[in-house]
Amino acid sequence: ITDLSENKGKQSYEANMMTASNYVAKSEETEIDGYIKRRKWTDMQRMENGLRIWEYHKGERTINYDDEVVFCYSVQSIAGKDIYVDECDTIVVGRNEPNIGVDKAMLYLHYGSKAKLILPSHLGYGFIGDSDRIGTNMILVYDIEIK
């Protein structure tokens, strides 16, 4: 009897977590769509995973897995608060760093590109944040340039 009640409690917890996760995802989707509409970013594309990309200056050569990429960026919250301004970083594509959203976006961009990215929280820093300036479940807006 104990095993059945423990299993039922675990299933109930998992179902509640899925419901909460779905609610957050739908809420973020609505917020992102409104943000894009207000700014009239009609060329912004939505990827299957929820990532939004607008390559407003297309570079020349495609970026591939395992490429080492230097990029400069500024990040704002979807509310418009500057989080990081004029930063540069180097990543190896395919290692999900600095976060999965930026890493995945690289595969849609080109060397020399300038782009706007919108990352739902699950593609940014999720529930944990970055332990510095990015809080829990933040939608992030990047302005990025691939060097």
Image (spheres, rainbow, N blue to C red):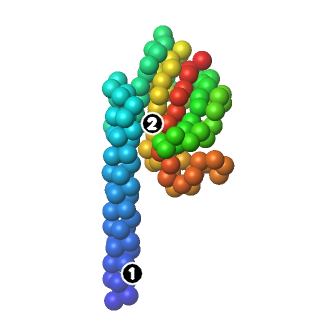
What distance separates the C-alpha of mark 2 from that of mark 1? 40 Å
Q: Position of residue 121 (x, y in %)?
A: 47, 47
**Residue under label 1:** 6
Q: Which amino acid type is shown beneath numbered disc 2?
A: Ile
Residue found 34% across the figure and 56% down from its top: 22
For residue 118, which numbered disc appears in the image?
A: 2
Q: Which marked residue is nearer to the observer: mark 2 or mark 1? A: 2
Mark 1 crowdedness (10 Å alpha carbons): few <14, some 14-19, many ≥20: few
Mark 2 crowdedness (10 Å alpha carbons): few <14, some 14-19, many ≥20: many
Q: Position of residue 32 (x, y in %)?
A: 38, 41
Q: Earlier in the sequence, mark 2 or mark 1?
A: 1
Q: Is residue 44 above or below residue 48?
A: above
Residue found 63% across the figure and 37% down from its top: 84
Q: Is residue 19 left or right of residue 99?
A: left
Residue 50 visible in the picture: no
Q: Is residue 110 above or below residue 122?
A: above
- The image quadrant where one finds the C terminus is top right
Residue found 34% across the figure and 72% down from its top: 11
Q: Position of residue 74 (x, y in %)?
A: 59, 32
Task: Classify mark 2: helix, strand or loop.
Answer: strand
Task: Classify mark 1: helix, strand or loop.
Answer: helix
Q: Is residue 48 above or below residue 130?
A: above
Q: Is residue 14 above or below residue 98?
A: below
